[in-house]
Image: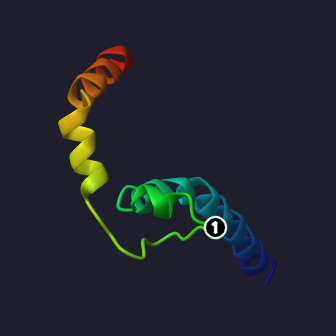
Amino acid sequence: MHDKKSTFIKYTILSLGAIVVLYPFFWMFGSSFKSYQEIFTYPPTLIPVEPTINTIVELFSEHNFSRYMFNSFFVAV
């Protein structure tokens, strides 16, 4: 009986930790499909109300994102 209780507590703590660690990634992914106005609305939303890929298109067309990623990869390796 004690093993089941300690296992439950252990998995509960691990699950909460996983949520805390993964939430910012869900937030970034959701925000990448939001317009600039929707990003700064209050209260904030995790899922975009009107999804758009304009920010992603702007990232690759108006900024040198591939160079930035290459530099990051080069420094990491």
Quadrant in which the C terminus appears: top left
45 or 1, which lies in front?
Answer: 45
Q: Position of residue 9 (x, y in %)?
A: 76, 72
Q: Residue at coordinates 26% horizontally, 31% vertically from top-left? A: 63
23 versus 47 height, above or below: above
Q: Position of residue 69 (x, y in %)?
A: 28, 28
- Horizontal placement of 72 versus 60: left or right? right
19 or 5, which lies in front?
Answer: 19
Q: Residue at coordinates 57% horizontally, 65% vertically from top-left? A: 41
Q: Residue at coordinates 37% horizontally, 55% vertically from top-left? A: 32
- Horizontal placement of 55 versus 45: left or right? left
Q: Amino acid at mark 1?
A: Tyr
Farthest right residue in view: 2
Quadrant of residue 17 within the rendered picture: bottom right
Quadrant of residue 33 within the rendered picture: bottom left
Quadrant in which the N terminus appears: bottom right
Element marked by disc 1:
loop
Query: In this figure, which residue is indicated by the disc labeled 1?
Result: 42
33 or 2, which lies in front?
Answer: 33
> Does the image show residue 26?
no
- Horizontal placement of 41 versus 12: left or right? left
Q: Position of residue 44 (x, y in %)?
A: 59, 67
67 versus 26 height, above or below: above
